Amino acid sequence: MFRHKAHRKHISAYDASEHHRENANKIINFYTIYLSLVLLVASPIAVLVTGEDNFWHNLFTIFTSPSKLVTDYFALGCLGSTLFNAAICGIAANILINLSVVRINATSFAAYMLVVAHGFYGLNFINMWPSIIGVFIYCKVMKKHFRDNIHVALFSTALGPFISDFVFRYTLDSGFDHANPKITWLGIVLAVFFGLATGFVVPALLPGTTAMHRGYNMYKAGLAIGILGIFLHSFLYKSLGIDTPDTIVIHNPEYYSMTYAYRGFMNIFFLFLFVSTLFMGFLLNNGSFRGYRQLLHSTGYGTDFLDKFGMPVCLINIGVYGLFILAYLNVIFVLPEFFSFLPKGVGFTGATAGVVFAALTFSADGQMPRTVAPIVVGYASLSLVVCILCTVINIPIPWTLSTQSYINGLAFATGLCPFAGKYGFKIGVLAGFLSAIICTSTAQMHGGFVLYNGGFTAGLTALVLLPVLDFYKITPKYQDDN
């Protein structure tokens, strides 16, 4: 380990740049493998806790079902089989990253986190491969290094629901029967062709759409893949007159009878994960939290925490930020109990568990509790406004903060945290408020086939908010970090 040198002005316990060059790649690689293994080990424990006696059948159901938003894998399969699916998707990402011999950075770490996140709802070990192979072939044809595009390949898995629909439903006149899934050669050909095509389109879209929101939406791929999803859905379904399928729901009375789903198990799981991550960062940071206060005072805009502070401090941030998210979820779950006028929401469904990981995606690249908090307040503010207006005009309150779509929406709206970091608390609240308004509408544009719907929503919010701030000459309060 490299000690902080007194004559240099480094805010971490390490010389961050030297530490990043020598050790960060190893630490990130170790941590992502550790996370995959934690999921893998948790799977048989979950099987024992829930008494899941048809594990392989449940896993087969997850693999062979159309998986548009929001397909809850806890309901479709069960807790153990879902954890196993997320684990093997994560391990596949680990293997790809290591085989490509890429020096892991904050972006490839983010891509890995999103693969794990969507392993709980919408992404599985079957539908993740065509687009990855498509990006690989794109690199070969264009004579580019796959290691430089591994993050693009992993981001492209957001289109996995299209793959599942092509293989298991799209070409079948009789529709989908989860008890007897069927495939056709035409469906397989469509899935392969789709994967190849997206492998060439997604790399072309990412730079342009990132420039559109000027870095104020951390979920950069969300806007690009969301726009692509609109065109694909419109052509493949609307233009051809093919019905967009409903979200698959299997009759699972035991699961749906649990008010908060697997709240107890998932709380213990995430407490273990985040506390161990925090402790890991603390130990690697020379047994201190030095540097984390400075990270919390960063704007988070255009700041690679990994380069600036070193990976140990980023691990501390992941641990603290993860505990912050966990506390928020547990509070909103019980709000309808204290305020009876609120409709009942959900608990730790597969989608809820998944978006905990999704909310941590850029915790090594700009996300932190201080700048995410205003986005949370923005969502809560819209909820309050809706409650007041519905009471005044005497209509039922339609949603609460624990409604599934708003949990998912907020997880990705945290990507708007650079607004809070640069413009201050009030603009951060406004960004969250605007994102909350449209978060339940955007999925209709792409038919629910894009897993990065929240990132797409955040991108649209940035596209609306930035021109307004520019027009009224509202300038950032805080300068970029140097």
Image: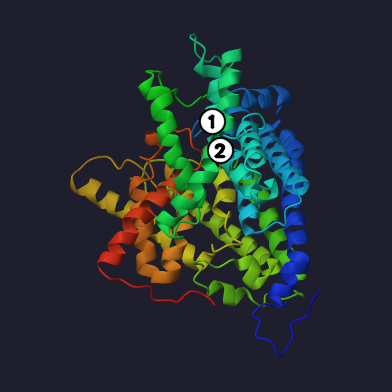
- Identified at 44% across, 47% down, the residue is 223
Three-letter amino acid code of the residue under disc 2: Phe
- Residue 32: % across, % down: 72, 52
Compared to residue 401, the image places residue 133 above or below, namely above
Q: Is residue 49 visible?
A: yes
Residue hosting label 1: 161
Task: Give left or right: position of 112 versus 475.
Answer: right
Judged from the image, the secondary structure of the residue bearing numbered disc 2 is helix
In the image, 373 versus 200, the foreground residue is 200
Three-letter amino acid code of the residue under disc 1: Pro
- Identified at 23% across, 40% down, the residue is 395
- Residue 198: % across, % down: 54, 35
In the image, 34 versus 213, the foreground residue is 213
User: Which picture quadrant has residue 399?
Assistant: top left
- Identified at 74% across, 68% down, the residue is 21
Residue hosting label 2: 200
Instruction: Give the class, few, some or many, for how many residues have Cα within 10 Å of label 2's Cα (few <14, many ≥20).
Output: some
User: In what quadrant of the picture does the C terminus appear?
Assistant: bottom right
Q: How is the image coloured?
A: rainbow
Mark 1 vs mark 2, foreground winner is 2
- Residue 147: % across, % down: 70, 49
In the image, 353 versus 393, the foreground residue is 353
Judged from the image, the secondary structure of the residue bearing numbered disc 1 is helix
User: In what quadrant of the picture does the N terminus appear?
Assistant: bottom right
